[in-house]
Amino acid sequence: MKIESVKPTRMELLNIRNRLSLAEKGHKLLEDKRDALVERFLKAIKERDDLRKEIDALLAEAFDALTDAEMIIGIDKVKRAVDTAQKLEEIEVYTENVMGVKVPRIREIDFKPKLNYSLSDTCARLDDAFVLFVKLIPKLLKLAEVEGAIWRLSVEIEKTKRRVNVLENILIPRLKETKKYIEMQLEEREREDFFRRKRMKAIMEKK
Amino acid sequence: MKIVAMCDEETAIGLKLAGFHEVYIPGDARKIFREVTSRKDVAVLFITERIAEGISKDLKEYLLQREDLPIVVEIPDKKGKLPEHVDNISMLVRRAVGVDIERRK
């Protein structure tokens, strides 16, 4: 809204005052929302970092065991054994509402698979690998959940930040400016009026 | 819902052992990535860093649009973590907060 396009009237001033207070209220609310989101976000990042470290270590260990198994009994046998591996059950995903942001959550599963391959054909290192991978599954799902949350939150934070900035840097200053302009115009008119009356009085008295 | 992975052949052996529902060894990573991410029955897509690096553009695009599932998670492959690989979650963090977050002990 350009300042010149406003009629400096009392009605308009009231209007602007209302809009300004509304914008300020909204600004405060959005700022609170942003801060709360960021807090949650930082918590998720910390959680993710810890999980990541854990998973990276476990994964390396599991792959080591697998490589050993491949070297001991040969890659073909490992592949055959792997093909018999039991598949995970289907997982369930639901959403949780965090300050208006829909964050995905994965229902924990109780996964206790059995070894399906023949023991005589394989070696102990393959069992090690198997155990490690099974241990990894819930952690990986947790990581997915946390990264999903970070993903959603980051989008929302960006949006909120933009809104806060628009209010803070554009809308509110503009409204303030307009308000000042109208107030000054009104005052000026009042002074003019006052002076005119005084002058009139002086002229009348002279007659 | 399903857990799906995209990885190289060697990593695939491990992930199959872990019981992943579907493991893809992509020839055309882009095509498979598009296919999987547009499916409705996939909850999580694990993707190795090496492959993620190759399709980083598509990955970024996917992360910035407003889709809920699947969640794409990058994991190191059998050869270990890539040095100097910036995963996409870190990119999102930088976009949202404006700075890299590093934690010191």
Image (cartoon, rainbow, N blue to C red):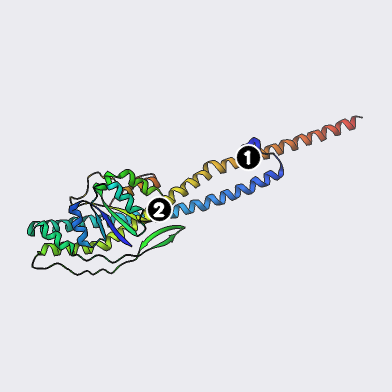
Quarter of the image for residue A69 reads bottom left
For the residues labelled 2 and 1, say whether their Cβ atoms are less than 8 Å apart.
no
Residue type indicated by callout 2:
Glu
Q: Is residue B9 left or right of residue A178?
A: left
User: Pointer 2 indicates a residue of which chain?
Assistant: B
Which of label 2 and label 1 is nearer to you?
Answer: 2
User: Badge 1: how crowded within 10 Å, few (<14), some, or many (20+)?
Assistant: many
User: Which residue lies at the image location 35% right of the left edge and 46% below the top edge?
Assistant: B60
Image coords of residue A54 (percent x, y): 24, 57
| Label 1 SS | helix
Image coords of residue A32 (percent x, y): 48, 53
Residue type indicated by callout 1:
Thr
- The image's mark for residue A178 is 1
Image coords of residue A176 (percent x, y): 60, 42
Quarter of the image for residue B46 reads bottom left
Nearest the viewer among A47 and A74 is A74
Q: Is residue B103 something one can see in this rendering?
A: no
| Label 2 SS | loop
Q: Work out which quarter of the rendered image holds the N terminus of chain B and state it.
A: bottom left
Distance between the alpha carbons at the discs numbered 2 and 1: 41 Å
Q: Is residue B23 left or right of residue A185?
A: left
- The image's mark for residue B70 is none
Q: Which residue is mark 2?
A: B67
